[in-house]
Image (spheres, rainbow, N blue to C red):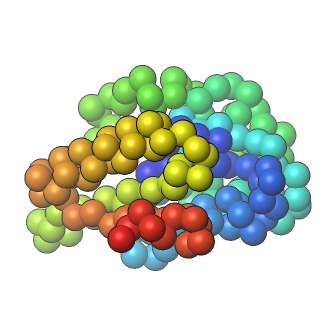
Amino acid sequence: LIVCGTGVVCDFLTGPSGWPYDLFKWSMLAVLNGGSVLFLGIGVGPVNHPLSHWLIKRTLGIADFRSYRDQASRQYMEGIGFDTGKDVVGPDTAYGLSRSLFFTNRGPEGNAPVIGVGLKDYALTGELNSYQDYLAIMVRFVSWLCENGYKVRLLIGDVHHDKQLTQ
């Protein structure tokens, strides 16, 4: 499971039952299924609820790798009592990742790794061109993954809003 960029390590507008719980649940499922969990160039905060603090610290604690997009995000985690001693601060992943971070093995027994692709329904924003551009990019990306031997699983975050994307 790779969580890159974004500011989902927060409970803004959702409380603990939003992003904190979703990240915890997805991360635990990945680990329980023998997968790795990586947080790359993430933004952090605000995290207001005590249960959100607990969920986020546990989630980032089981990650195999953590990096923050800025020093403020790393300091935020330190401020809520999380040890960031082995963590890295680096540029947002939109600027590219070093090839040394990519896995070269094909998974257990030569099987292709499964890539989870998160989808978001932007149609409700009224920005039709942006939404169409987003869908076109996601289709190209998923097509590339399939053409290169990866198995793809589509992930949705909100059944009410995002389910139409998987149909």
Left or right of 30 on screen, residue 137: left
Location of residue 106 by image quarter: bottom left
Location of residue 102 by image quarter: top left
Q: Is residue 133 visible?
A: yes
Q: Quadrant of the N terminus?
A: bottom left
State the residue at coordinates (12%, 57%): 149
State the residue at coordinates (27%, 63%): 152
Q: Quadrant of the C terminus?
A: bottom left
Q: Is residue 12 placed above or below 165 in the rendered structure? A: above
State the residue at coordinates (37%, 26%): 96
Q: Foreground residue, 32 or 157?
A: 157
Percent coordinates x, y for residue 103 in the rendering = 26, 47
Q: How many numbered circles does the render carry?
A: 0
Percent coordinates x, y for residue 122 in the rendering = 53, 49
Left or right of 163 on screen, residue 44: right
Q: Is residue 86 visible?
A: no
Q: Foreground residue, 155 or 41?
A: 155
State the residue at coordinates (65%, 42%): 7
Percent coordinates x, y for residue 159 in the rendering = 56, 72
Percent coordinates x, y for residue 21 in the rendering = 68, 67
Q: Is residue 90 placed above or below 27 in the rendered structure? A: above
Left or right of 110 on screen, residue 88: right
